[in-house]
């Protein structure tokens, strides 16, 4: 059985074009979002304002410093309950990281605002 590649090419091309036209027509009459059909000039993407991005960055920094402060406090309590070399090393590492991030968050707050 021989395959006619030219017929196969045209068949696949026309079926692809037909599916594309059907989907384009379907979504024109039945849009997915907000019951509005978008044209080429409409932009569904609305960029955020710079203030919102700065506030998100600031909140992320504040959240990470809060978490690191809690980790430092946890290891301080653990070291006071059971003063081993391991808990002391974890306490120093966690508190050093928290102090470093706190100083960076103060610098970033002054840069953001």
Image (cartoon, rainbow, N blue to C red):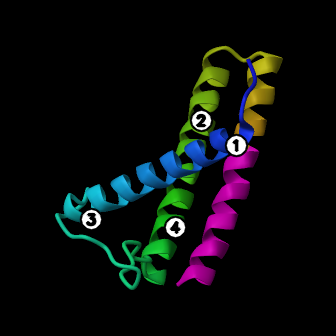
Q: Is residue 85 magenta?
A: no
Q: CA distance from mark 3 to mark 1?
A: 58 Å
SS of the residue under disc 3: helix
Badge 4 vs badge 2, beta-carbon distance below 8 Å: no
Q: CA distance from mark 1 to mark 2?
A: 8 Å
Residue carrying label 4: 58
SS of the residue under disc 4: helix
Of marks 1 and 4, the one in the foreground: 4
Specify start and end residues of the magenta stretch as a single range. Answer: 96-113
Residue carrying label 1: 95
Quarter of the N terminus within the rendering: top right
Look at the picture and state if 71 lies above or below 97: above
Q: Residue at (64%, 42%) from the top-left corner?
A: 7
Q: CA distance from mark 3 to mark 4?
A: 41 Å
Residue 98 located left or right of residue 28: right
Residue carrying label 2: 71
Q: Residue at (67%, 49%) from the top-left corner?
A: 98
Q: Is residue 111 magenta?
A: yes
Residue 28's disc number:
3
């Amino acid at each position: 059985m021989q395959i006619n590649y030219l017929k196969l090419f045209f068949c696949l091309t026309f079926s692809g074009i037909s599916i594309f036209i059907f989907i384009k027509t379907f979504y024109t009459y039945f849009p997915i979002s907000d019951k509005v059909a978008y044209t080429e000039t409409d932009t569904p993407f609305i960029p955020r304002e710079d203030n919102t991005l700065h506030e998100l960055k600031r909140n992320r920094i504040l959240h990470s410093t809060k978490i690191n402060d809690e980790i430092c406090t946890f290891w301080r309590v653990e070291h006071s309950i059971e003063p081993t070399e391991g808990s002391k090393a974890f306490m120093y590492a966690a508190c050093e990281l928290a102090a470093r991030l706190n100083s960076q968050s103060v610098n970033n707050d002054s840069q953001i605002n």
